Structure formats: structure tokens, C-alpha cells
Amino acid sequence: MKQFIVLSVTFVMLVKPFWPVAEYIMNYDYIINVLCENKDKPQMHCDGKCYLAKQLAKETEKSDKNPFGENRSKTEIQPMVFFQALLQMDFAVDILNKGLDNFKTDQEFISTLFTTDISHPPELA
């Protein structure tokens, strides 16, 4: 359900700027005959495009407004990027040196049998 709502809101946000064009297509005849400013000049072949241009300008003006008020920052922040040369290291020598001491062996051997700890033989159940 949550995914459906998110997809619906996203779809509405993406389609909203194209609404004046859809309205122009749906009401094409009415716009040409009634709302067109250049209907007395048929040689211009305006066909209501003047009305469409006004509607698109209104939509652009609405979308350019800052929803958080007019406190938009007037300064532009330029990101500063610094590049520094990496240290040149010879990894082959390091790998060869590290490979020698991977395992530490313990040379201390215990030579007792622990026979003093067993006082009696185990019982069979």
C-alpha cells in the first residue's frame, strides 16, 4: 500500500508540468475558436499556440517559486577541490617480506603423559 502511494505521488509530480499540454490537446477546438488571440489572423496559423504558451509560462512561474518563502540565498557556493599526489609505494617488496612470517610456530614441547591424573579406569554403564 505504501509503495502504491509513493508511486502515485511520484507520477502526479512528474505529470503536473505536462498538464497544460494535455488540456490544450483535449480542448483544441474550443481554444482555437474562443481563446486564441490571433483568430482574426488565419495566415499566422497560430491554432491556439499563443494560449498554450501563456499556460506553460504560468506553470513555469509556479514551479520556479520557492516553497519555503523568498529567503533564497543569492550567493553561489563554489565547491573547492584539492588534489594531492599519492605516495608512490612498491607493494611487491612489502608482499614478499610479509609472506615469510604468516605463521608463528611454538617450539616448546611438553613431554609428560598426564598419567598421574587418571586415578581409576572408566566405568562401563
Image: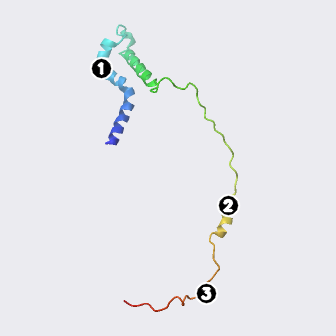
- Label 1, secondary structure: give it: loop
Residue at 34% across / 25% down in the picture?
22
Disc 2: which residue: 92
Residue 124 vs residue 19, the one in the foreground:
124
Where is residue 92 shown, x and y percent of the image?
Answer: 67, 61
Single out the mark in the foreground, 3 or 1.
3
Query: What is the three-letter code of the residue carrying label 2?
Result: Ala
Determine the residue positioned at 63% across, 69% down: 102
Q: Amino acid at mark 3?
A: Ser
* Image side of residue 110 versus residue 18, left or right: right
Looking at the rendering, which quadrant does residue 17 occupy?
A: top left
| Sequence order check, earlier mark of 3 and 1 | 1
Q: Residues within 10 Å of mark 2 (few under 14, many from 20)?
A: few
Q: Which residue is drawn at the image coordinates 67% and 58% (left, top)?
A: 91
Disc with the residue nearer the chain's start (1 vs 2)? 1
Q: Residue at x 68, y 65 (%)?
A: 97
The x and y percentages for residue 77 are 59, 31
Q: Which residue is mark 3?
A: 111
Q: Residue 38: x and y, percent?
A: 37, 10
Location of residue 51 with respect to 109 vertically, above or below: above
Q: Give me the C-alpha separation between circle 3 and circle 2.
A: 43 Å
In the shown orientation, is residue 82 left or right of residue 42? right
* Label 3 SS: loop
What residue is shown with label 1? 27
Looking at the image, the residue that sits furthest to the front is 119
Position of residue 118 in the picture relative to residue 124 (left or right): right
Asked if 37 appears above or below 95 in the picture, the reply is: above
